[in-house]
Structure formats: structure tokens, C-alpha cells
Image (tube, helix red, strand yellow):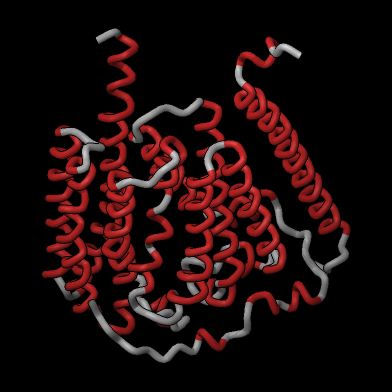
Amino acid sequence: MSDVTVDITAQNAAPSWADPADAAGMGGQGSVEDYWALLKPRVMSLAIFTAFVGMAVAPGAIHPVLALVAILCIAVGAGAAGALNMWYDADIDAVMQRTAKRPIPRGTITPGEALGFGTVLAAGSVLLFGLAVDWVAAAILAGSIAFYLFVYTMWLKRSTPQNIVIGGAAGAFPPMIGWAAVTGSVDMASVSLFLIIFVWTPPHFWALALYKAGDYERVNIPMLPVVAGTDETRRQIWLYSLVLMPVTVMPWWFGAAGHAYLALAVALGAAFLVKAWRVYSVRDGEEANRAARSLFRYSILYLFLLFAGLLVEQGIVPLARNALGL
Amino acid sequence: MPMNSPVRDDQDAARRRKRSIVLGLVLGALVVLFYVITIVHMGGDVAKRSF
């Protein structure tokens, strides 16, 4: 792990809630699309998918309506976390090319509106989840929203190059929440699903940060390539990729997956390692950027296929067998 | 475009209208959802209660 001290000037930036638009009583300009964008729909879709897999793999049964409510609450909770993140990060979003077109930097939604929207959705999703489905799952959802906002967004993101390592836990909770919605508990198999996304996040984000380092540097976000250099980032990507391989085998080890999943995890993992090694070994020029881009894109497909494999093996195949009377 | 131009007012009104419609639909969907959740939790024997 890298241990780098950084000078954080972004921490001293004016808080986004002090926005003049709020003070002037403006607002009400946001369209439905703007509010939709506040929910970070792409991140939300990953949460929905992995939560659904967690529910499908979990032992036991849940009423289909309650399963739908659970997925809805997880989706809305993830969206609320995204809105609250955009509220707090409005100052740096405005400077970064990748995020400059978000609703708050564009001025269509005021920070106050985003804060209110996110808070209501967060409270509503947790409350409905607990009342309708399960309080253990609702508590994990509440914890993950709080973790994403207070630990990642407000604290780690602007203060340490390990931000994405610990902050990545927030995105790793959905399969565990889905599992808890069915079982009402947390066990090693659900923790293994959490760990897969947790360990996958650093190489995934650092691959992106390698070719977007300039963006983070401009806003003083201490992403690893900015503070420790690209060589150290490539080394960390390689190390985390090595750790990721045995972690993806854990669901099989704890009995939540079978041999088909194991074979898939090994095959996909081998391809991941090849791409991570290429990022580690090719360090200069456009070729190096291409390798990082390739790993970033593959990492998304990798996680999707891994969880899809689990869903097919543990959810769809048994269902089909039952339906056909096999 | 000036803040109070007619075109801007029209755009604002259209945006507000769409927002209101979507909000109404969401609230309606929540009413249906809460009803269905209640039925699911009460179970199928709710009509057979002995008072």
C-alpha cells in the first residue's frame, strides 16, 4: 500500500451548501432528466444487478412482490447516495471534464435541492425496506449510504490516495443487502460477494485514473496516479488483480456457487490478469493509455459476467430444472 | 436569453408541468405499492378471520 501525504487545498473550498443560487432563493429549474441524472443511473444499474444476484443466490425464498420492493429500495438508496455525493462534490465536479455537465455544475439544480432530494430518498428507501422487507437488510442499506457520504465523499476522497480502496466498500454492499433481504442475516457467502466488488474496485478505478489523472490533479483529489505516480499505480493495480483472483473463488468455497461458476471465475480472472500485466509492463506513450483503457472496459464486463454466471448457475438453471421437472 | 423572456417562461412552465406529472405518477405508484405490500403481509387468510 502506498503511504503518501498530500497537501489538500480542495478541503478548504467553500462548502457546496453555501451556493449563491440557494441563498438567492433560486431553484425549481431542474427537469425530470436532471433529477434522474442526480441518481447516477449507471452506478444504480450495477447496484440493482448485483443486489438481484445476491437475492437469487441466497438460500431461502422471498415473496416476488417483496423481492421487487427490496430491489426498488436498493436502487433508490443507491441513487440517493449518488445525489448526496453530487451535492457535496459540486465544487470539484464543476472543474472536472468528466463531471462538468452534471446538473448542479450546469446550474439546473441547486445544491440545496440535491441535498433535499437525496435525503428524502435515502430516508424513504431505508424506512420502506425495513417496514416491508427486513430490518437487517435496511440497516445495511442505511450503513452503505452513510459510508458513501460521510466516509468516502466527505472524508477519504479528498484526503488520501487510498480513497477508492476503502470507499469502494460502499459499492460492494448491494449483493450483501440482497442476500440479507432473503435470509435476514449476514454470512460468509454474502461477505464473499461483498469482497469481490470491494477488491475489484481499486484496479477498476485506478485504470480509469491512469488516463484521467489530469482531471483529478486539477481539483486536488489525491488519486493514486496524482500523488504516487503512474508506476506505483500500475504496481498497485497488478497487486490488487492478484488478490482479486482468489477472492472470486470464495463463493464456491463457501458453497454459494458451483463448479461452472468456478471455471468461469478462473477463465475471466486469467484474462483480467493478462490485461493488468499489460498495464503494469507497458508504461509509455499511447500504448500505455490503450492498455489502461482496455483494462477499465474489461473490468466492467468482467464483473458483469462473473455475477451473471452466478445468477445463471444458482438462480436460472435451478428454476428451469424445477419448471421442467428435472 | 433574459431571465424573464416569454420563451424562457414557456420552457419553465413545460418543465414544471412534466415534473408535476412524473411526481404524481410516482405518488400514485407508491399508493398501489403500499396497498400490495399490505395484502402480501396480511396473507391469503385475511378474509377468513373469525371475529
The furthest residue to the bottom = A7
- Quick check: can you spot residue A218? no
Location of residue B40 in the rendering, given as x and y in whole percent from the top left corner: 60, 24
Q: Which of the two residues, B26 or A198, is positioned nearer the viewer here?
A: A198
Which residue is rendered at x = 13% and y = 45% of the image? A266
Q: Which of the two residues, A35 or B48, is positioned nearer the viewer here?
A: B48
Q: Is residue A298 above or below residue A105?
A: above
Instruction: Specify the quadrant of the image occupied by residue A312.
Output: top left
Location of residue A119 in the rendering, given as x and y in whole percent from the top left corner: 65, 59
Instruction: Specify the quadrant of the image occupied by residue A27.
Output: bottom right
Q: Which of the two residues, A70 or B22, is positioned nearer the viewer here?
A: A70
Which residue is rendered at x = 12% and y = 56% of the image? A274
Instruction: Specify the quadrant of the image occupied by residue A120.
Output: bottom right
Q: Left or right: where does residue B34 sit relative to residue A73?
A: right
Q: Is residue A6 above or below residue B16?
A: below
Which residue is rendered at x = 53% and y = 66% of the image? A149
Q: Work out which quarter of the rendered image holds the N terminus of chain B and state it.
A: bottom right
The furthest residue to the top = A325
Q: Is residue A254 above or below residue A89?
A: above
Label count reads: 0
Which residue is rendered at x = 65% and y = 49% of the image? A124
- Quick check: can you spot residue A233? yes
